[in-house]
Amino acid sequence: MRLVLNRLLLLAIVFPSLAAARQSDNKVSPRLVQAKPVSENQESSQRQKKNDDMQGMPGMDHDEGQRTQMGSTNLMSMNPETFLQEIVRHASSGTSAEPDSTPTPMLMTMKGMWTVMFHANAFLLDEQQSGSRGGDKLFSTNWFMPMAQRSVGPGMFTARVMLSLEPATITGRRYPLLFQQGETAYGDPIADGQHPHNFFMEVAGLYDWKLANKTLLSVYFAPVGDPALGPTAFPHRYSAFEDPLAPLGHHQEDSTHIADDVGTIGLTYGIARIEASGFHGREPDEFRWDIDQGQPDSWSTRLTVQPGKNWSAQYSYGRIESPEALFPRENQERMTSSVMYNRPLHNGNWASTILWGRTRSLQDDSIFNSYLLESLVRFRTRNYAWTRIEDVDRSNELILGENPLPSGFQEEAIGRVQAYTFGYDHDFDWIPHVATAPGAQFTGYGVADTLKPIYGSHPFGVAIFLRFRPFSGEER
């Protein structure tokens, strides 16, 4: 029965987005929405259009005194001035939030009562790594997210689908990434590699109801989606937007961003939001083209605070039932904490994230910590430079490599690894409506003494890539 309901929800979410997109007036070019509007006249026109859509929402009439508190004409704004507007924009993964001032590259058009948007980020890259455990591969990491919003009753309804072609563009069920571990390929543990994302990364419906001037009640349901655990997942985190590879701490920080049968309820008041989620805890299986099913058996809660337009902080806690296929009897406790800072610049932007993640086995009390610092600066409009610095615990699975686990194997931490990444790319308009950026990044590693006999003292990796992102008009 749940399978039938989920399929019906999938059709209900996908159809409005695709139908609205097909019916769009071809004479209207989509535009890329950023933190700053193209012009005051355009913003005024957009706000007037959205006012007509939002008349049914409490407090959304044209009385200036009632809307002064919001700092804008309504909740639905692509350039949010308040935390409530940032939430309703729903530009991040799941129900997570970034600072209000964070730019959101997207194509957007209006059709009737619907606002239709499209987000995407795709990399074609060649990865080269040193040492006996290093790998070389040509592959693509990518995601595509159509979404549609409209007012329904007293609130705002959002339908969102996130897709990835990585099951087709990453062969062998993983790409090379030194010191990465987590999930399986062909039944064996992945070591020094990162698994692809599912084709269906998210299929979700969201509803936001403004209860009072500063109060918002939000509901999220997703056959596959992102519960309230961790910060914005790395594919959508703006500080990680130009890095084509996953962080080493992914499985301590935000690996639940693809989970089954997710339900979340959130209450926001002013600058603070509290959320609670239920979901199925098992990580996605190796067959990446379908939507998995599972009874909700895990839960999480998250507190998010946004004290200003440029700041966002969150703390989250979760209990995850049997997340790993190789250790089906092991349940986990996860805690994460993060602070994000975003600062608009003249012809650019600067975004940074500090993140801590921890998992604890509820079976043997083993603990794995990860720490991350990311920073991305866009300058002189077309230039991007970034860094990612990590310090993560690694387990004895790395010593075994990609071999079957021996009988009675007990996973335990054996030391820390540091990763230092630096990269640069530059936008060109080679393809109409697509910003194309050739770029490169270098990663050097600090290796724990227990792993030096296997990896050497100074392994490194180099990635050369082309990045593609939808683009039109003059804004990026």
Image (spheres, rainbow, N blue to C red):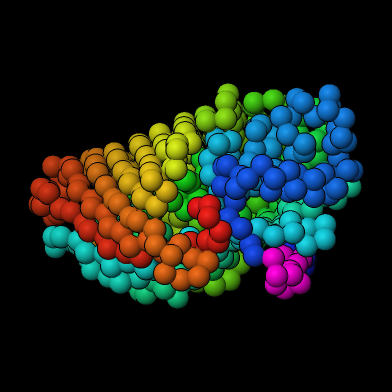
State which region is magenta: 16-28
In this view of the protein, which residue sits in the foreground, 364 or 33?
33
Residue 180 vs residue 332: left or right? left
In this view of the protein, which residue sits in the foreground, 67 or 399?
67
In this view of the protein, which residue sits in the foreground, 146 or 414?
146
Q: Is residue 26 magenta?
A: yes
Residue 32: x and y in percent read 58, 55
Residue 384 vs residue 144: left or right? left
Q: Please report the residue visible at 50 percent of the width from the left and 70 percent of the height from the top.
A: 432
How many marks can you see?
Answer: 0
Check the image and report above or below for 444 versus 341: below
Q: Is residue 325 visible?
A: yes
User: Quadrant of residue 59 in the image?
Assistant: top right
Residue 242: x and y in percent read 39, 53
Q: Is residue 303 magenta?
A: no
Quarter in which the N terminus is drawn: bottom right
User: Quadrant of residue 146 in the image?
Assistant: bottom right
Residue 426 vs residue 213: left or right? left
Q: Is residue 179 visible?
A: no
Q: Please report the residue visible at 55 percent of the width from the left and 36 percent of the height from the top.
A: 101
Q: Please report the residue visible at 74 percent of the width from the left and 59 percent of the height from the top.
A: 110
Residue 75: x and y in percent read 75, 39
Q: Please report the residue visible at 40 percent of the width from the left and 34 percent of the height from the top.
A: 354
Residue 379: x and y in percent read 38, 44
